[in-house]
Image (tube, rainbow, N blue to C red):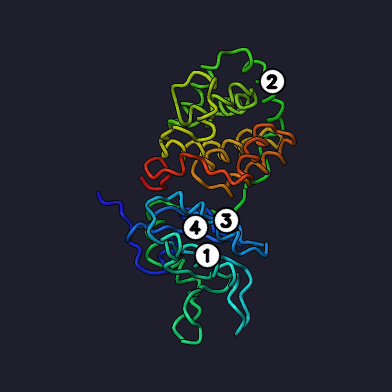
Amino acid sequence: MNDAIRISTPADILGFIPHTLGFAPRESFVFVTLRGNTLGATLRVDAPVTGDPAGFARAMLEYIALDTHATAVLLAIYTGDAPAAGAPRPFHDHVEALIQELEIAGTPLKDAWLVTAEYWQNLLCDPDAGCCGPEPLESIIDGQLNAEMVFRGSSYLKQPGTSYAAFTGPADTAERIREAVPGVLAFELGTGRALWAEALAGNGFADPETTVQLLACFQRPDLRDVLFCNVIEPERPDAQDSGDLLIGQGITPDWNRVDRAQETARSLIGAAPEGYRAALLTLIGWLAYLKGQSSVAADHFAAALADTPGYRLAELMDQLVSRGTIAPVAREEHTSYKRHR
């Protein structure tokens, strides 16, 4: 079976971007590398707010250079502010600096588009030539590429960030979790690992007692850490010497299992009262970091710290992402995340 998706128009590329990011970007620069006629890596950064276009361009080039097979680059700029008629294009100086740096590097900017809250249009052609007028956003949403991605089961958040509803479960859930924690502390790590393995195998945890047990497992730090590790290495008995794994060094994940782990954690969050969600939010954020989705990761670490102020693992991961670190696993073509396998 051929899983290749044919992308032939700018609207197709703009339809592909939110699917590969996992969310619809806002106030962002999104770079997509080209490898000949094939799309390569996708990089999203916040739209620049500084007045140093050359510095911004050089910083972006460092990230783009991680794709050693790139032959050219595409750029989509997302902003909620549509420029007035006759006004310069948004981020004009930054775009010009990018064009210059990418040309020198041998990976020229092949095309670029502006996406506003009202329309999208080509960003490089001369607007006075009458060949690059505004296009309706519906042409992206209703396009063949977006329809194909949805048909294949892909979806994305309408905006970056976390979107977890407030807890509405039984009033005694927090008490039941607290009561379960001593038992979790008493049993060997293997018991919690078995519960987590069952959940990731798709066997579910619909009964309330199993759900409470899993939530209690994530409250025990050494067990929590090995449950994180078991997403990538199912047979690992503990989290000793797992530093490289946690930063994404030297691993080749089963990305289908990673997706299942994120979905399982999201389901558990729905069953968890506030104050018991930090570990699960951190887990989702960590797995997003491994996928190269730093914005999603940072939002989840922030949510974890809002749920449990001072939550140390979220603080450490947030510091890693805040430095602009890209997980080593996300830098390599043969190990990086691909949504459809």
Q: Which residue position is annotated with label 2? A: 179
Q: Nearer the viewer, mark 4 or mark 2?
A: 4
User: Which class describes the residues within 10 Å of circle 1: few (<14), some (14-19), or many (20+)?
Assistant: many
Of the two numbered discs 3 and 1 on the same chain, state the one appearing first in sequence: 3
Q: Earlier in the sequence, mark 4 or mark 3?
A: 4
Residue 98, numbered circle: 1
Count of marks, rendered view: 4
Spot occupied by residue 43 in the image (x, y as percentages of width and height): 50, 54
Image height of 136 relative to 70, above or below: below
Disc 3 marks a residue whose amino acid type is Val
CA gap, disc 4 and disc 2: 42 Å
Circle nearer the N terminus (1, 4) = 4
Q: Residues within 10 Å of mark 4 (few under 14, many from 20)?
A: many
Seen in the picture, residue 335 relative to 47 is either above or below; the reply is above
Instruction: Give the residue at x 68% y 34%.
Output: 170
Which residue is denoted by mark 4 in the rendering?
A: 18
Q: Residues within 10 Å of mark 3 (few under 14, many from 20)?
A: some
Report the side of 121 relative to 145 (left or right): right
Secondary structure found at label 2: helix
Label 3 sits on residue: 45
